[in-house]
Image (spheres, coloured by chain):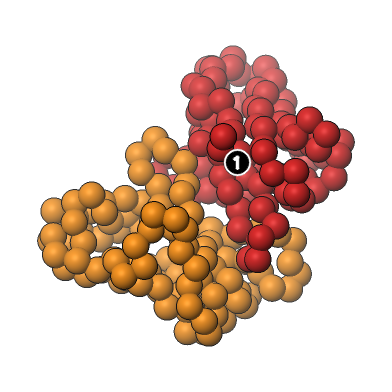
Chain colours: A red, B orange
Amino acid sequence: QKEVEQNSGPLSVPEGAIASLNCTYSDRGSQSFFWYRQYSGKSPELIMSIYSNGDKEDGRFTAQLNKASQYVSLLIRDSQPSDSATYLCAGAIIQGAQKLVFGQGTRLTINP
Amino acid sequence: GAVVSQHPSWVICKSGTSVKIECRSLDFQATTMFWYRQFPKQSLMLMATSNEGSKATYEQGVEKDKFLINHASLTLSTLTVTSAHPEDSSFYICSARRVIPNTGELFFGEGSRLTVL
């Protein structure tokens, strides 16, 4: 079992709708979770970080964490074509250097 | 703040040669940097953790003699791909964790695309 798993998609959402991205993790000791956005040929950029159970909102983005279910999600409201990218979920594995382990990424396409 | 710069952004080399990639944290100190490799349409795979002033820690399956890592200062880590072969062609991305404040997040460089002919 991979430490962080995502549905690789592709996921297609019409413009203006809500895009929902999901991620599960296996290490119950993981403390911090991050969503990164990666455009083709570019390096990842941080979208959201979440450390405690519940929801965290930042503009059109909402991250949700449920440690009991080992589940992290990202909601994108009012989706825009510029949101089309691959979204990477990452969990901080608490071992020594606190390395980040990434899921395989979900490719999201917003259709105008 | 929290800018990480990689150089070169792309490089083409002949099989058998060595290539060095630099990763610099421009406005913060990083005792730990991470090197990732990403093949097309795949996720980031951690290769090694670079520790300032000590030996790097390599992930399982990554050859330490082939991928030499040097973290000589708090702002610079280098990855040298020795005797590169076409299968080493990939997108190499470094990242750094800020010491202060440590929020756990990683700041990524722009990536270096290596093509071995």
Disc 1 residue crowd, few under 14, some 14–19, many 20+, Cα 10 Å: some
Q: Can residue B1 be seen in this snapshot?
A: no
Front in this rendered view, residue B69 or B116? B69
A112 over A73 or under it: above or below: above
Drawn side of residue A70 relative to residue A38, left or right: right
Q: Residue furthest top?
A: A14
Front in this rendered view, residue A103 or B93? A103
Residue under the point 43% across and 66% down? B6
A37 over A9 or under it: above or below: below
Instruction: Give the chain letter at badge 1.
Output: A
Front in this rendered view, residue A60 or B62? B62
Drawn side of residue A59 relative to residue B80, left or right: right
Query: x, y (%) of residue A108?
Result: 54, 26
Q: Quadrant of residue A14?
A: top right
Query: Which quadrant, please, contains the N terminus of chain B?
Result: bottom right
Residue under the point 23% across and 49% down? B87
Query: x, y (%) of residue A82?
Result: 55, 32
Drawn side of residue A106 relative to residue A59, left or right: left
Q: Quadrant of residue A36?
A: top right
Amino acid found under the numbered disc labelled 1: Glu
Query: x, y (%) of residue B56?
Result: 48, 72
Q: Which residue is mark 1?
A: A3
Q: Can residue B102 be seen in this snapshot?
A: yes
Kindly state the secondary structure of the residue where label 1 is placed: loop
Residue under the point 31% across and 70% down? B65
A26 over B49 or under it: above or below: above
Residue under the point 66% across and 28% down? A22
